[in-house]
């Protein structure tokens, strides 16, 4: 018994066979099989949706299916004497009714601040064009990046301060160019967990937050797959069994913006010589040696590139720009279950990445940035329940990196720069000095950790103390006079506490100390300094979780959290004429957030996420705190998706976000060398852009056949075409100002066929 | 990664600026409506420490250009951290600390030149010299303030290229003959007549030797070579010039559309500045008188 369209097996379906009306069938005694009102035989489908009925009399019969997921279904059959009959029933899944109760168990050992989204919700978020990982933008505590800037800004932390893991393997980015799509294809993701702060000892090296993505196992009940297309990209996925104990999943996606972009950016002098294009790919190969021993090969990667020539009649505006960024990760994940209470996981992985490669020429000023790195990692963890109410998690997290850089460029922008992310679009080339650097850096980070989960008073008290000891070994410029090598040990205690006051209400709190290695670029002898301190933070989180229950039905989850982050030793631009950076920066981020969520239950899911926060930085002692580039006081996201029928589904998302801070121009002077006026800025981030509003809509129309499902969707971003300022722009001498606004209404029509 | 942030910011800005987003359109800066500094020139274009430079400026106002006085000085505000140039914030401040200024020549007329004795290297604080730019040059900052009775003071900061070591010496570019108006040579002092709203076809070229090949040496780097990029900038005090800059992509022509409501008998000014990307420049001007339609 399979679901119509998707062919997902229906387990637990009751199958019965009765004589058809008027059939001569075998008439038994009342109460006997075959007697009126009594089935001839019955069975229940297994996990693969299969059922077997024994010998049945020949003739016309009625097969009746009944299950909570499918309702009732009948099919007439004719049985022939002496012949086995195999039948596949494709049945529609039932939309959940008002009388249905969906019980969602809370996951044990979860972090205090985490928010977890399951696959079914991930697929239905409006405004994300079906891209599962873009859902993270809608979670509380996550700031809205500027248009086209796919950064992850969590609880007021810099994008560099947060990490993304896929199956425990770190990936450098979550999004492709412009933030249009994430680097993992649809349907590969099983769940996404955002932990914005005070996360456990399992992870480290990030003073911001953690995004943890788990991938699902390949299907084993037959060959499945999909193909999708929309104006941004095309994608395919294929999965299925390879023998009895092995299964595979392979997916790939490629943008075809190189074909559509010239229509989006109709500038005759701008000629794209490559792209913009990206592709990504995923391979999962899972082998089950025994039910206790599972080995999974994981390969995923991403590759973005674009290049253009802008031949302007004004030589200072002529430009050549080639940029590429890519990564690949390959890992082997071995799971061994010693017993129901003890499991070992070992994941060695290797990677290669080009975080950025730029070859450009702006008005005769060349810029060359060639950076690449190799990573070799090992994550090993043993989880065991030692006693009733006492679990232990112990492991080691090793990360090795060799990065090499060859750069000729101006100083890159940093957080707090007026021409950086804060939103001032400055015309013309900058009068920057050019710096060169060439060298290699080696990071060897060893982080053993241990965490206990203590459950007491019948589970009403949960305490998770943990400790992580991270050993930072950093070196660079080997074989040169600037060679440096440092080794530091940082001890990072973590604690999470949850008290279940009632069945429906829990109080929680967490605290932890966190460190992270300096960015390799910041250890450059010309762009940074080699003796930068290791940035650190202390996170404090407290809140409550509650379920709103009406007549025994859990209508909403409520999650309320307050947080405070104390950030130290941040790399900032130095004063004086010494090295460009020092570690005098400090920061603080504080606020509260609310998540009101109606869990997915058939027809409807919806949530409201609201964050009230303040994130500030102080670059040097004695200075005042200033707003962080992405300090957004109010972030409100309300979204919902409703299945009207099996064939129609509609979703809406509304976002309101306080405008980003910006730095005003207080005057300008004329630069005769470049024939440009240059701005002089006021206090950093002392002004703000207007607030952001956007309403997004998604409509799905499903066409369902027994073995095939076609999803035609319309995803409309910014339905009201609200002009959202993304940056300030000025006239030639900075006496007039206006705003660059993001995209107006953007309808995207897509098609996805699944079998 | 910070480099990735740079990349994303660049591509985002590209998208926004290039048409992915929407931006208001402002008037170009080709039309002079108040006192303007259009160019500053040093002769020689690159000067050794301890030598002398002759500085002049093209400072204009709408109409007759009278009533402008200039203050010249060397700004010795130190740069800090990653700042490439001696602090432009301090140097451009109308209320700059006088202690940061040297060799003031006040009250000069716009046509005057100013002789600057460039300090010897031993007398210069290294922090008052810029870091090398894309062409390998380092610069001192010359501050020019233009005063005009009816406009706010205008500050210009000219980067005077210093000759250090044995690298190639920059020279000022030069016009190849005279500019062309509607395909015919337009000599100095030749005031052309044109009707209101007329579109004038303008063209200018540089001499063969203006585009210089050069070498430069950065600290800890082998000697590198480069070729200058030149451009013409076109200005007027009535009408609109499109494009405002020429010389790129092999294009040297531009159009000057006179104001449709220009009064007959009015004299309109055209200024053309030729500059290279190493601090060299030269200029010329022409006049058109509005004829009766």
Image: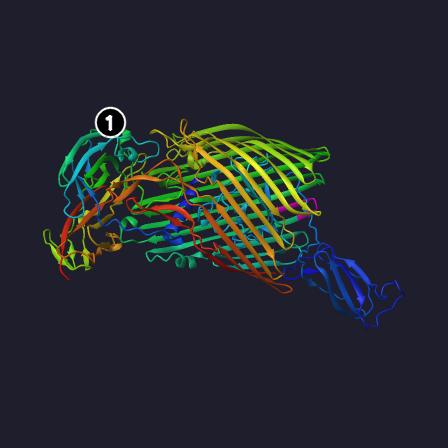
Q: Nearer the viewer, residue B243 or B127?
A: B243
- Image side of residue A580 versus residue A353, left or right: left
Q: Which residue is mark 1?
A: B99
Dominant secondary-structure state across the stretch colored magenta: strand
Tell me residue B47's x, y (percent): 19, 36
Q: Does A298 appear above or below B48?
A: below
Tell me what residue is drawn at x 45 percent, y 55 percent: A721
Query: Would residue A292 be counted in the magenta stretch?
Result: yes
Query: Would residue A386 be counted in the magenta stretch?
Result: no
Q: Nearer the viewer, residue A388 or B151?
A: B151
How many numbered circles are shown?
1
Q: The C terminus of chain B appears in which quarter of the rendering?
A: bottom left
Q: Does A293 appear above or below A240?
A: above
Q: Nearer the viewer, residue B261 or B184?
A: B261
Q: The N terminus of chain B appears in which quarter of the rendering?
A: top left
How are the colours assigned in the image? rainbow
Q: Chain of mark 1?
A: B
Highlighted magenta segment, given as a residue range: A288-296
Which residue is the extreme one toward the left? B189
Q: Does A105 appear above or below A239?
A: above
Tell me residue A404's x, y (percent): 43, 39
Q: Does B73 appear above or below A736?
A: above
Hey, which quadrant is residue A140 in on the image? top right
Query: Which SS class for mark 1?
Result: helix
Hey, which quadrant is residue B196 in on the image? bottom left
- Image side of residue B177 versus residue A322, left or right: left
Q: Looking at the image, can residue B52 be seen? A: no
Tell me residue A2's x, y (percent): 68, 60
């Amino acid at each position: 018994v399979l679901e119509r369209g998707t062919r997902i097996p229906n387990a637990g379906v009751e199958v019965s066979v009765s004589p058809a009306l008027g059939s001569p069938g075998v008439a038994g005694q009342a109460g006997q099989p075959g007697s009126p009102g009594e089935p001839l035989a019955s069975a229940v489908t297994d996990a693969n949706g299969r059922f077997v009925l024994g010998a049945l009399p020949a003739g016309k019969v009625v097969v009746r299916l009944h299950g909570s997921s499918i309702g009732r279904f009948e099919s007439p059959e004719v049985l022939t004497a002496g012949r086995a009959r195999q039948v596949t029933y494709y049945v529609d899944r039932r939309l959940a009714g008002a009388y249905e109760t969906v019980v969602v168990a809370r996951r044990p050992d979860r972090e205090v601040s985490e928010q977890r989204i399951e696959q079914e919700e991930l697929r239905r978020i409006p405004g994300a064009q079906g891209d599962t990982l873009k859902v993270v933008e809608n979670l509380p505590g996550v700031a809205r990046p500027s248009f086209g800037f796919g950064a992850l800004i969590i609880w007021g932390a810099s994008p560099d301060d947060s990490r993304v893991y896929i199956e425990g393997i770190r990936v450098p980015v979550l999004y492709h160019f412009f933030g249009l799509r994430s680097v993992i294809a649809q349907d590969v993701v099983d769940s996404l967990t955002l932990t914005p702060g005070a996360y456990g000892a399992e992870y480290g090296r990030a003073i911001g937050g953690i995004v943890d993505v788990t991938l699902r196992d390949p299907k084993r009940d037959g060959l499945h797959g999909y193909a999708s297309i929309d104006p941004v990209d095309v994608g395919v996925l294929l999965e299925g069994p390879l023998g009895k104990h092995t299964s595979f999943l392979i997916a790939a996606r490629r943008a075809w913006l190189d074909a559509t972009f010239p229509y989006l950016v109709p500038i005759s002098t701008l000629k794209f010589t490559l792209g913009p294009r990206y592709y990504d790919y995923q391979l999962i190969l899972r082998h089950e040696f025994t039910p206790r021993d599972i080995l999974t090969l994981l390969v995923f990667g991403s590759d973005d590139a674009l290049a253009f020539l802008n031949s302007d009649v004004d030589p200072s505006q002529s430009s050549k720009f080639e940029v590429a960024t890519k990564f690949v990760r390959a890992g082997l994940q071995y799971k061994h279950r010693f017993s129901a209470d003890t499991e070992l996981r070992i994941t060695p992985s290797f990677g290669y990445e080009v975080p950025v490669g730029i070859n450009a020429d702006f008005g005769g000023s060349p810029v060359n940035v060639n950076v690449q790195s190799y990573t070799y990692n090992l994550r090993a963890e043993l989880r065991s329940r030692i006693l009733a109410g006492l679990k232990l998690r112990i492991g080691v997290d090793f990360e090795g990196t060799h990065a090499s850089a060859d750069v000729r460029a101006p100083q890159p922008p940093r957080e707090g720069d007026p021409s950086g992310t804060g939103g001032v679009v400055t015309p013309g080339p900058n009068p920057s000095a050019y710096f060169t650097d060439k060298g290699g850096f080696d990071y060897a980070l060893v982080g053993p950790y241990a965490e206990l989960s203590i459950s007491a008073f019948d589970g009403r008290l949960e305490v998770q103390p943990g400790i992580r000891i991270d050993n930072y070994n950093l070196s660079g410029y080997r074989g040169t006079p600037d060679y440096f090598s440092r080794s530091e040990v940082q001890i990072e205690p973590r604690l999470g506490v949850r008290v279940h006051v009632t069945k429906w209400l829990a109080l929680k709190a967490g605290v932890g100390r966190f460190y992270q290695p300096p960015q390799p670029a910041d250890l450059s002898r010309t762009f940074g300094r080699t003796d930068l301190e290791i940035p650190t933070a202390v996170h404090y989180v407290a809140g409550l979780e509650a379920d709103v229950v009406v007549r025994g039905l859990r209508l909403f989850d409520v999650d309320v959290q307050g947080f405070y982050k104390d950030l130290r030793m941040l790399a900032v631009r130095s004063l004086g004429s010494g090295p460009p950076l020092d570690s005098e920066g400090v920061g603080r981020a504080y606020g509260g957030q609310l998540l009101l969520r109606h869990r997915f239950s058939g027809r409807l899911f919806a949530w409201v996420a609201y964050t009230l926060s303040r994130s500030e930085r102080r670059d040097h002692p004695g200075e005042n705190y200033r707003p962080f580039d992405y300090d957004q006081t109010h972030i409100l996201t309300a979204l919902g998706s409703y299945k009207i029928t099996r064939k129609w589904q509609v979703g809406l998302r509304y976002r309101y976000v306080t405008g980003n801070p910006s730095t005003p121009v207080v005057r300008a002077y004329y630069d005769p060398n470049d024939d440009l006026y240059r701005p002089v800025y006021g206090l950093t981030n002392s002004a703000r852009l207007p607030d952001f509003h956007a309403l997004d809509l998604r409509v799905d129309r499903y066409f369902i056949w027994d073995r095939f499902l076609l999803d035609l969707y319309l995803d409309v971003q910014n339905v009201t075409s609200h002009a959202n300022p993304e940056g300030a722009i000025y006239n030639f001498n900075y006496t007039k100002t206006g705003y660059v606004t993001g995209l107006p209404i953007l309808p995207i029509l897509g098609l996805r066929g699944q079998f | 990664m910070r480099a990735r942030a740079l990349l994303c910011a660049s591509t985002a800005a590209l998208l926004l600026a290039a048409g992915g987003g929407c931006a208001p359109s402002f008037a170009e800066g080709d039309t002079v409506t108040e006192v303007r500094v259009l160019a500053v020139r040093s002769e020689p274009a690159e000067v050794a420490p301890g030598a002398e430079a002759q500085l002049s400026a093209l400072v204009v106002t709408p109409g007759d250009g009278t009533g402008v006085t200039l203050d010249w000085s060397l700004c010795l505000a130190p740069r800090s951290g990653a700042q490439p140039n001696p602090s432009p914030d301090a140097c451009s401040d109308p209320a700059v600390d006088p202690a940061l200024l040297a060799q003031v020549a006040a009250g000069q007329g716009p046509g005057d030149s100013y002789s600057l004795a460039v300090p010897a290297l031993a007398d210069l604080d290294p922090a008052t010299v810029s870091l090398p730019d894309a062409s390998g040059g380092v610069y001192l900052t010359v501050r020019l303030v233009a005063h005009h009775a009816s406009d706010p003071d205008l500050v210009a900061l000219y980067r005077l290229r210093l000759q250090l070591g044995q690298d190639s010496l920059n020279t000022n570019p030069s016009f190849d003959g005279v500019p062309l108006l509607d395909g015919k040579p337009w000599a100095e002092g030749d005031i052309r007549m044109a009707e209101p709203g007329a579109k004038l076809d303008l063209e200018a070229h540089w001499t063969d030797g203006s585009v210089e090949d050069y070498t430069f040496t950065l600290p800890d780097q082998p000697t590198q070579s480069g070729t200058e990029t030149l451009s013409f900038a076109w200005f007027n005090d009535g009408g609109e010039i499109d494009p405002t800059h020429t010389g790129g992509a092999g294009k040297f022509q531009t159009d000057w559309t006179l104001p449709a409501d220009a009064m007959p008998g009015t004299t309109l000014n055209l200024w053309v500045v030729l500059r290279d990307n190493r601090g060299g420049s030269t200029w010329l001007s022409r006049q058109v008188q509005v004829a009766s339609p």
